[in-house]
Structures are given as structure tokens and as C-alpha cells.
Image (cartoon, rainbow, N blue to C red):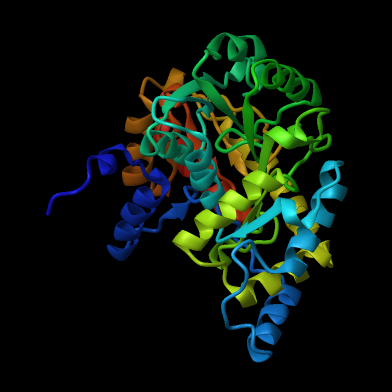
Amino acid sequence: MRLAKRMNRLGTETAFDVLARAKQLEAAGKPVIHLEIGEPDFDTPQHIIDAACEALNSGWTHYGPSAGDPELREAIADHISQSRGFLVEPDEVVVVPGAKPIIYWGITALIDHGDEVIYPNPGFPIYESMINFCGGKPVPIPLREEIEFRLDVEELADLVTDRTRLIILNSPQNPTGGVLTKEDLEAVAEIAIEHDLMVMSDEPYELILYEGEHHSIAAVEGMKERTILLDCFSKSFAMTGWRLGYGVMNKELAAQIAKLQTNCTSCTTSFVQRAGIAALRGPMEPSLAMVAEFKKRRDVIVDGLNQIPGISCLRPHGAFYVFPNITETGYNCRELADKILEEANVAVLSGTAFGQYGEGYLRLSYANSVENIQEAVDRIHKLLS
């Protein structure tokens, strides 16, 4: 079989490869602790499940509009208007199966061959994969530990050229848990406006924030029309398997993204969208309780990792990941991740799974019980001691 050359430019998510290896070890009788997958370990709240069941029993099993259920688009517009602080209309919303389609279709709609896209590194690996796949040129902006994995705005300005078309932001951030400040976003907005650039703001961890408050660049004056805000239900509502997300953007671009959905998936699953309405309209107590538990786990894993020789770990402000520095252990990150899996039976990810600037780090998800987190830290401690 002869594949198109573009397939050579397509990347993947290492987390699923590590998960497969961990499952093989479990099948061989090894007691693996999973800290590799970025997925809440909580069940979807019951009122959301009930809404989906009711929708199924009420006939929501047919095609829907490509841009999404009008009632869900209205609920999303209300949610974003309240949570992000700028007015959104329903026809500025496109509902899609998960958040990734907005990344793919947004880049497809905006980037021609050779156009440059600045993206965070270490960062979600699908950014670089999709930029390459669509024929763009990925330009990494390093996220540095010394500034709590925020981006350096002056460095960002130096990366902009006459071929730059798009800047990708992610806050709270995967894999580091870093959070951009309001001042950071205002400075990025100034660069975007000066150079007539679009911004893709990836905000699926908006609710999972432990200190301060969330800010979106779309709320900065002059940025609503040039921002694609993407979010999903996976993290805040423990709905990873439901595959429900959305993008908020100017009406002209929203119509083009809806056209891409028509060509690719026709529409997002109808009864799942009814569950999305229930998620946004509450109650919110299950989600808030989940965030409170994540904060407790964050403190357990950070305090534990900082007791291990050769490891130091910042306390992240958001998401549910830690990104400890392992340079003093004497291993590179891939060697150590493999050693921890094979010898300590703890599944973690190497920092370079998230880009070249992830060398010297590991990513651990603390979407697991306190007991399992403590046991995982103890195993790693014994291994490195």
C-alpha cells in the first residue's frame, strides 16, 4: 500500500503508547499505577447521564445541524459570556466531537503551505502534529521553569515573522500546569493586533484552577474577532468518552468550521449534545468537588516528589499534571520514564513527549487516588534511592 506523503508528517500522543505498554505489564501480573493518562478518574455526574438517557428515550438519535444543537450553542454562548467576561452569540459557536477537531479544522482553515504557527513547547503534542500535517511551519515558544512555565512575551515577539499567521495558547497548561496571567495575555494580544495575527486559545482546564482566576485572551479589547477559543466537556465534567467540545470564534470563521464538520463528521452526536446542556446548566457541585480533590492530590504528589533525590517539582496552579525536573538524577527523561515503568511499575510520560523543550522533565497526572499517588511516589523514591 502506498500512503500519501502527508502521513509522514502526522504525530501522535505518547500517552496512549505508554498506556498500551502498561497494560501489557498488568496482563503479566505487574501492579501498575497509572499516572500517564490525562483523564479524570471520576464518573460523569449522574444528572448528565440522566439527561443523555432521557434524550435517547425521547428520540434524539438522528442527524442534527452541523454547527450544533441550537439550544446547546445558546447554553455555550451563555456559559462563555459569564465565565470569560465577553459577550458571545450562539452563531459564534460550533459544537464538535471533542476539542481536537477545532485544533485541526482551525489550522486547516487558516494556514496555507509554509505559513508559520507559534505554539507552546512543551505542549500538547497535537498542536505540532496538526501544523505539520496541514503544511504549516511549527515555531515553538519555550515554556521555562524559571517563570513557572509561562511564556516569555519578549521571546514570543522575536519569533514573529512576515509568515506568522497564528499563535496557540494553552492555559491552564498541559503538561506543566502553568497558568498565563492577565498581563501575559494583554502583552500577547498587543503582539497579535500589531501583526494582524489570529490566536487559538485552548482552555479545557478553565475550571481546574487552584489559585487566582482564569483569564481568556478573547476578553482582551480587540481580541474577540481574532481568537478561536476552544473548550470541551472532558475535563471539567469528567466526560472524556462522550467526545463533546466546541469552538467560539467570529461568525465568518464559524461558518467555515461548520462546513468542515459537514464534510468530515456531518454533526456531533445528538443525544450527547443534550447531555452537554445539562452539564452547563448545572448543578456544578460535582465538578467543584472534583477540583477540590485534585487540589488535595496536587499537594500530596508535589510534596512527595520534592523528597526524592534528584527531583524538584513546582506546585502547578491549574490542570491535573505535575512536571518535575529530573536533571539531577543523571538520566534523560525518556530513560527515566522507561525505568520507572519497567522497574517501579509506575506509568509516567517523558517530557519530550510534549516537545524538545521537555527534556529534563517528566509528566505525571494526578488523576488518581491519594493512596495510589502516595504508593507511586514511594516506589519512585525507592528506585532512585
Q: Quadrant of the C terminus?
A: top left
The answer to whether residue 174 is above or below residue 283 is above
Residue 216 at x, y percent in the picture: 76, 36
Q: Quadrant of the N terminus?
A: bottom left
Tell me if 342 is positioned left or right of 41 in this view.
left
**In this view of the protein, can residue 377 be seen by the observer?**
no
**In this view of the protein, can residue 364 be seen by the observer?**
yes
The answer to whether residue 130 is above or below residue 63 is above
Q: 142 or 177, which lies in front?
A: 142
The part of the image, by quadrant, that contains residue 215 is top right
Tell me if 188 is positioned left or right of 331 in this view.
right
Residue 329 at x, y percent in the picture: 42, 22
Residue in view at x 66 percent, y 45 percent: 252
Q: 136 or 290, which lies in front?
A: 136
Residue in view at x 73 percent, y 36 percent: 225
How many numbered tags mark residues here? 0
Residue in view at x 31 percent, y 53 percent: 21
Q: 249 or 139, which lies in front?
A: 249
Residue 25 at x, y percent in the picture: 31, 57
Tell me if 234 is positioned left or right of 107 in this view.
right
Residue furthest out toward the left:
1
Residue 372 at x, y percent in the picture: 55, 54
Residue in view at x 43 percent, y 34 percent: 131
The answer to whether residue 226 is above or below residue 12 is above
Q: 202 or 345, which lies in front?
A: 202
